[in-house]
Amino acid sequence: MRRASSLPEPAEPRAGLVLRAVLSLLVPLVRWLVHNGVTYGSFAPALKSVFVEAGRQELEASGGKLTDSALSVLSGVHRRDIREMGAASHMQAQPKAPSVASQVFTRWVTDARLRDGADRPMALPKSGDAPSFDALARQVSSDVHPRTLLAEMQRLGLVQVSEDTVHLLVQAFVPQQGFDELVELFAANAADHLAAAAHNLRHPGGDKFLEQSVFASGLSPRSTQQLGALARKLWRPAFQQMAREATARYEHDSREQQGSMRMRFGVYFYAEPLGDDTGPAQPAAGTARRRPPKAAKAARGRARTAPRRAG
């Protein structure tokens, strides 16, 4: 990302480096904001509460005294604004618990008793003893009636009811309807991905979270489509194994009353056309190097790959 020369930058070199990195992270987010009608004029003031909440978390983690003055010094937000925010400055630090619909979906696609001879999720009778949709819904929650849950999963485009049989329409919990649910999933997944990467940068000598990727440039559109299909194929067994193990451990820890942690395991794939100033694949250390224009043009006929390792 090219930074305007008039953009103010922190005096500390490390802070300036971090700011430039974050600005590059914001490009796809701001494009999404603009696409949905969120302008700079509404986004910039809203950032105050984010900085105040981040300052609050930093003070709590360090054992510092939580005062408006301390928050102002750490976040850069004026004390008057912090006082005016009051309780409204407290943002949700963690995503909400998975919806009952997502829990039912996950149980359905991972429980070996609910899979057919081809190892695919079975269609389930709408009611009756297990295996049935009603029995599955009651296993997951006693607070939501199975009929209500079925209607919600139909609204999200996850299932279809044919006579008295319920069929899954998708292989992953990605609602086909419901913008609110899609935004919530996006926020939870992207936030935890960034949190893992930021943790690894904050604690270079400690335990690191898994946060790796493979990067390649000089590919054809057909190749990226095939690699995208491969990525989804590789994800399915990883999802199955992790979801089964996470369910078993959740049930064990609930019995032992040890459920004090949460986790998220994910994967992503992205492809786009090369820009005029796109260099080769980044080396594993992540230090960008630019090629002369002629070399860049000649090299685009070759695919180059490199692992990206952060943790």
Image (tube, helix red, strand yellow):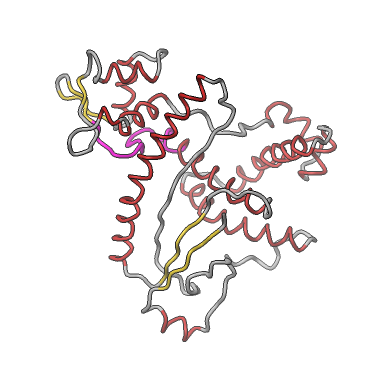
The picture quadrant where one finds residue 246 is: top left
Residue 127 pos. (x, y %) = 23, 15
Residue 300 pos. (x, y %) = 40, 78
Answer left or right for 279 relative to 10: left
Image quarter of the N terminus = bottom right
Answer left or right for 250 relative to 228: right
Q: Residue at x 57, y 75 (%)?
A: 289
Q: 271 or 105, which lies in front?
A: 105
Magenta-tinted stretch: 168-183
Residue 112 pos. (x, y %) = 28, 31
Q: Residue at x 32, y 70 (%)?
A: 220
Answer left or right for 123 relative to 8: left
Image quarter of the C terminus = bottom right
Q: Residue lying farthest bottom?
A: 294
The picture quadrant where one finds residue 55 is: top right
Magenta span: predominant SS is loop
Q: Residue at x 28, y 16 (%)?
A: 134
The answer to whether 309 is drawn above or below residue 139 in the figure is below
